[in-house]
Every structure is written in C-alpha cells, then in structure tokens.
C-alpha cells in the first residue's frame, strides 16, 4: 500500500494513480478502434465487393481491442482496492 504523510495525515495514492493509469491505458484501444474502422471504410471504398470479408475481420479485431480495454478496467478496480 502506497501512502504519503501530509500534515500528519496519510493519503492513499493507489486510487488516483490507478485512475490515471486506466485513463492512459484507454487511449490505446480508442486509437485502435479508430484505425480499424478507418481501414474498413477505406477498403470498402476501394473494393466494395470485399465489404463482407472486411467486416468480419474488423469485428474480430474490434473485439480483441475492446478486451484489452476491459482488462484495463479490471486492473483499475484491483489496483484501487474496490
């Protein structure tokens, strides 16, 4: 447990640091989702007949990226202690 004594009062830093860490960790999946759907739109614009194949690949990678965000959320709750 990490704590700092300020004016004779212990302050728990874990919850604040966990929130900052999750916020920074959510940036990656956010950028990833944007890149996935941008690639699908670009690929469909270039080759419309490949849309169904692109969509199946996009949904699969979207789920994998979102699982990373959910793992980050679980780690946040573990680190913050509640």
Image: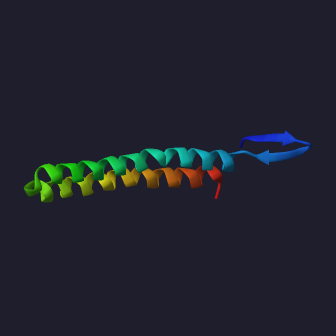
Dividing the picture into quarters, in which one does residue 52 lie? bottom left
Front residue of this view, candidates 18 and 34:
34
Front residue of this view, candidates 52 and 13:
52
Residue ID at (26%, 57%): 59
Quadrant location of the C terminus in the rendered image: bottom right
Task: Give the x, y percent position of residue 67.
Answer: 39, 54
Residue ID at (33%, 51%): 64
Task: Give the x, y percent position of residue 24.
Answer: 53, 44
Q: How is the image coloured?
A: rainbow
8 horizontally vs 65: left or right: right
Count of labels in the image: 0
5 horizontally vs 31: left or right: right
Dividing the picture into quarters, in which one does residue 49 lie? bottom left
Front residue of this view, candidates 38 and 71:
38
Front residue of this view, candidates 28 and 70:
28
Residue ID at (80%, 47%): 11
Q: Residue furthest left?
A: 49
Quadrant location of the N terminus in the rendered image: top right
Task: Give the x, y percent position of residue 41.
Answer: 23, 53
Q: Residue furthest front?
A: 45
Q: Residue furthest right?
A: 8
Task: Give the x, y percent position of residue 9.
Answer: 88, 46
């Amino acid at each position: 447990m990490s704590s700092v004594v300020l004016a004779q009062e212990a302050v728990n830093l874990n919850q604040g640091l966990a929130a900052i860490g999750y916020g920074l960790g959510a940036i990656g999946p956010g950028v990833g989702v944007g890149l996935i759907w941008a690639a699908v739109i670009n690929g469909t614009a270039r080759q419309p007949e490949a849309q169904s194949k692109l969509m199946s690949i996009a949904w699969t990678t979207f789920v994998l990226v979102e699982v990373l965000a959910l793992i980050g959320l679980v780690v946040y709750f573990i680190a913050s202690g509640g």
